[in-house]
Image (cartoon, rainbow, N blue to C red):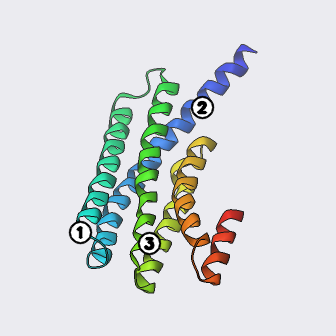
Amino acid sequence: MKDEKDLEKRVFAEQVLLLFRQYVPAGLTGNIVSIIIAVVLWEQVPTGLLLGWLIALNISLLATHLLVWCYLRRGNNGETEIWYRRYVAAISFVAFSWASLAFFLRYNLPPLHQDVVIMMLVGVATSALVLAIPTLITYYIYLSLPMLFLTSWLVFQQQSALNWLGALAVMF
């Protein structure tokens, strides 16, 4: 029984280490992609809102980068559960920041710009596979927040194709 508990603790510690290691390239990519999205939407949405979103997202990404750096530098020192909770909290803020991108869809964006926002949110949700799969709770948080806002926007549109896309998003 004790050996089983020790094995579970070691496996969990490896899963948490994997979460932190996987964040490094994904987080840096997020910084770059957020700037590209801001450039694409610059003339389409109110600049103050766009800058607010960009700053909030990059603060959440930076905070998570710092958390990852501290963990990888120090190790978990037997505090795996604490580091895991910190990661879940940080990744939740990142996911919420990305999800808030869906609010720009209400600004009557041209179809191409809508497509960029929709594809970005689907891409963020898909990145949950990389960022969060070692533990289900992080996977669900990172997957559900971006898709929740996008799906609700799609379902309440006046175009049946977008409604059906929203219905498909609910199923997935």
Residue 29, given in percent of the width and then of the height, sits at 37, 61
Say which of marks 3 and 2 sits in front: 3
Q: Which residue in the structure is indicated by mark 1? A: 47
Lateral position of residue 154 relative to residue 110, left or right:
right
Q: Which residue in the structure is indicated by mark 3? A: 105
Q: Nearer the viewer, residue 25 or 105?
A: 105
Q: How many marks?
A: 3
Q: Residue at x 48, y 20 (%)?
A: 78
Mark 3: give few (<14), some (14-19) or many (20+) Cα within 10 Å.
Answer: some
Q: Are marks 3 and 1 in contact (CB under 8 Å)?
A: no
Mark 1: give few (<14), some (14-19) or many (20+) Cα within 10 Å.
Answer: few
Q: Nearer the viewer, residue 28 or 48?
A: 48
Q: Residue at x 45, y 38 (%)?
A: 89
Secondary-structure class at tag 3: helix
Residue at the farthest bottom position: 111
Residue 133, given in percent of the width and then of the height, sits at 59, 49
Q: Are marks 3 and 2 in contact (CB under 8 Å)?
A: no
Alpha carbon separation for disc pair 3 and 2: 39 Å
Residue 156, given in percent of the width and then of the height, sits at 59, 71
Lateral position of residue 90 relative to residue 41, left or right:
right
Q: Earlier in the sequence, mark 3 or mark 1?
A: 1
172 versus 27 height, above or below: below
Q: Please, what is the three-letter code of the amino acid marked with disc 3?
A: Leu
Q: Nearer the viewer, residue 136 or 23?
A: 136
Residue 97 visible in the snapshot: yes
